[in-house]
Amino acid sequence: MKIFTLIPVLFVGALLLYAAKDFPEWGSPSGPASDSPVSSHFIANTGVDTEVPNMVTAVLADYRGFDTMFETVVVFIAGMAVIAILKNSGRKKPVRREYEVDAEPDLIVTNTVRLLIPVIQIFAFYVLAHGHVSPGGGFQGGVLMGASFILVALSWDLETALARFPMQWTTIVAGLGIVLYAGIGIFSMFLGGEFLDYAELAKVFPVSREMARYHAMLGVEIGVGLTVTAIMFSLYANLSSEGRLQRGL
Amino acid sequence: MENAIAWILIFPLLGSVACAILGIFNRKICYPIAVFSMAGSFWAGIETLIQVISVDGHIVSYLFGGWTLDAYPRGVGIEFHADILAILITLVVLGVGLIVALYSKLPVQEETPDKEPLFYTLFLLQITGLAGICLTGDAFNLYVLIEVAALTGYGLIAMGSNRAAAATFNYLILGTIGASLYLLGVGYIYIKTGTLNMVGIREVILAQGLAESPTMQVAFVLIGIGILIKMAFFPFHAWLPNAYCNAPTTTSSLLAPLVTKVMIYVMIRMILSVFGVEFSFESNLWTELLPWLVVVAIICAAVMALAQREIKRMLSYLIVAEVGYMVGGVWIYNYYGMIGSIFHIISDACMTLCLFLGTGIILRKCKTTHFDGLRGLFSKMPLTMSGFFIGGFSIIGLPPTCGFFSKWYLITGGMVSERWEYMVVLMFSTMVMVVLFFRMIERIYLAVSESGKNLGHGHGDLGLNEEQTRFDEGPLSMVIPLLLAAATVMVIGIYNQNVVDLIELFLEAFDLPKGTMR
Amino acid sequence: MLEEGNIINELLIERLNYFIYVVLLLIGLYGMIAKKNLIKKLIGMSIFQTAIILFYVSVAVKEGSTIPIYLPEHDPHGHTGDIKESNITDAIHAGPSVLKSELVKDYSNPLPHVLMLTAIVVGVGTLGLALALCLRIYQGYGTIEEDELLAKMESREIRSKSLSVQIPKEKSEISNRRKPPSKKGKPQPTSKSKSVSKKKSVSTSKSENQVSVKSSRSQKNKKAVKKVVGSKVSNKGNKS
């Protein structure tokens, strides 16, 4: 039986490798992808258009900002769908298995984590804000921030983490992130440009067009970070407790 | 309003976030928000249609982020490229979404209690994804929007019972394979052309003569297989019957008419606009092989539909057969076949909507969709049944419903290009569908039991007592959308010439043969 | 075997990176299709998506280039660092300016990195949703092996089908039984109805056995069937 599944898999592999001899050399700077007008424009003109040193963040949040908005929407959908699938689905009281033991939160772990979490959260803010000049940005910062809440849930228990970040607030914060992103876009539209045309914000703020893009990118990244934080924690809370939101891992 | 094309997506997006946030406080507010967002989006779609028709060249090009084409190279920003085909299919998506949003009030309350805000959030995001797929002009943006539509689809289906969750898992695995193969194909295109904009890719292929390169051919195959998996073309159709049967009523009414048809639009877009007619159809392998695979697909789907005893499952197999029609219409490489395929996308969405809406009302009233539970329904629910059967007649292909005209063009295409196998299988499956629907009419109207024995005494007596044949129509919030859908089927059929004129206007830019190719 | 132009040479030496990504992709694809455990399928999906991401990132590489972040000498905000240690000979600019085209090849291509940020996030979302589905399936069926799952689903479907199909047949039987004696008193229709009802009683007893074997909840149903069969037997006894 497994031979039958091996045949289409090998066929796909042969198909993919058939084109390999046609690819440009690995690392050649004159290949069509590396030499195209699009990517040359990104490398040469990011400073002029947006004054952001990090080309990847500029492309992500400004040139292809519409894609990033839908990426944030995908994160939001994942969170909402997990809640929708797992809500009211299992037993009301969790089943106690023989190997499960009620453990007290350990002294060393909790005190270490108590010292670490503020540092992690400040680092998350740093990564988010410095996405313009170093590798970083909304997604990366958001994941770090969400991880700090998951760390609380792991060291103490899920109820403690939920007391700090209740499940309803995760939905609200995630939604606010998308509203912030789309709101900046709609505001630009009302000012006369296209959707997500940040340069039009120069008409209300006392900055040049390029700096308007710079600052709007930060706003957009904050929106992304909010959504990712909330959904990371919400995914953990729902998956670890099978939707019941009690007695997680 | 020149930003109408952006508002098509913004209304459902903001509506879904509003449903998610405000739904925490008050569950009942989600239904009006959903209807209002869909209405706003539909209005923006009509505005864009007017713009597309009135502008020279019939293309509306909208660049997000302000990276307009006069100052920056093409492909620097993301473009929404709305030509006639795109805006027609977008309007179909928005219209179906509006009708299902109106219909959804009672089924959502009953089948997924406590989860209404989540349902409407996912519902509106699904419409955003589908409408965006139809409008976008950027290959990677298309992947992101396909994933938006897919993830919301998985969430919407799995909100139902446990069986739904098991069916969704299979759908998820196959859907991820399909979307990832599409992504890999786009990667192969990018490594050779250096741009992701659909018009830009076409320009590079023409300028550098990349039609012969193995990379582009493999990219075409990968994208083709990926999209065929996502549109449930035989033999990748295994996920569709389970997923649509076990889903909640509103979910199947939304997904069944739209998801597979939008994927067929993606296939047409890739063939015509990205790779070009000469590239796609020059290889004999595809144009010879695929119509035969289509023949096998339609026969298998029609036979499986005959074997079913339950309405929803029968309709799912009919969807597989309809997908076969449309894929065949494209790949017989003929002008009339292409018109037939595009018109069939529009008409199939409407008639599948009618059938699934009617099935939802039957399920609500009779608590079963098995054939045995359907006796006497015509006197009990005449409005629902007439709406249901208008959809049925359209699938069979009776004039003046729109199904007749789309089948007419498909058969003309098959005849003109001398593809007798395609024409014969179209007629065969039409006969099978006649048998299917008239068997149902017999059961509903004449009370014939499983073994064929007439349970009543003589003509019209159903063997049921007075109580079971009393007029007991479904709730108004469900019947009115069904009648709207049935009216749309009739209106598109009556005004078919206008729609076909628009499609022909679109196809003028491409050079499809009008006669035989052999 | 390893000379120029041979296919092995091409695959394994010149295009080694693409070969590795394709092998990873095939491992992932095989896992998704062939494995029976749902979690193993998800691991395969993750490997599959990772291979595609690696492929895209490899497109962005340029030999001898640095990451796509402007070096201090090209920084758009003007030069802010210490210039004594560096070897720059260009004039220091005060504001942003277009990068000279021969310097473009010193930076990697940023576009595939951006695309793959999106693809990674989409993959994570799909994985989270799939794990929630696995949880739900386990809660409902108690297993995450595909063959056991199919067997359990089929057995539940047969159980629910036999329950739901019972009811319309019974109604027709009851109505059939009541009407003939009142409308037509002739022996022929009654004998026809008797033979039909006998056939129906055989089928109901068979399905009754099915019901009793498959489900223990349908006590009420079984009793109703027994009543019908019992009264039919008594009716037959009366008539004969």
Image (cartoon, coloured by chain):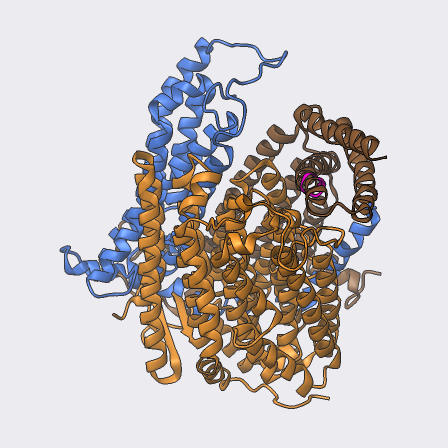
Q: Give the percent coordinates (x, y) of residue B128.
A: 41, 56
Q: Residue at x 29, y 63 (%)?
A: A49
* Side of C90 relative to A82 (left or right): left
The residue lying furthest to the bottom in this view is B515
Q: Is residue C198 above or below residue C17?
A: above
Which of these two is toward me, A200 or A166?
Answer: A166
- Identify the colour of chain C in the image: brown
Q: Give the percent coordinates (x, y) of residue B424.
A: 74, 77
* Residue A208 quadrant: bottom left
* Residue B1 quadrant: bottom left
* Residue B331 quadrant: bottom right
Q: Give the percent coordinates (x, y) of residue C170.
A: 69, 38
Q: Which residues are magenta?
A: C173-177
- Identify the colour of chain B in the image: orange
Instruction: Label the magenta part by its dominant secondary structure.
Output: helix
* Res B93 seen here: no
Membership of C175 in magenta stretch: yes
* Res B516 seen here: yes
Q: Is residue C43 above or below residue C5?
A: above
Membership of A239 in magenta stretch: no
Q: Give the percent coordinates (x, y) of residue A175.
A: 33, 42
* Side of B330 relative to B14 (left or right): right
Q: Is residue B416 above or below residue A57?
A: below
Which of these two is toward me, B407 or C210?
Answer: C210
- Identify the colour of chain A in the image: blue
Q: Residue at x 44, y 43 (%)?
A: B108
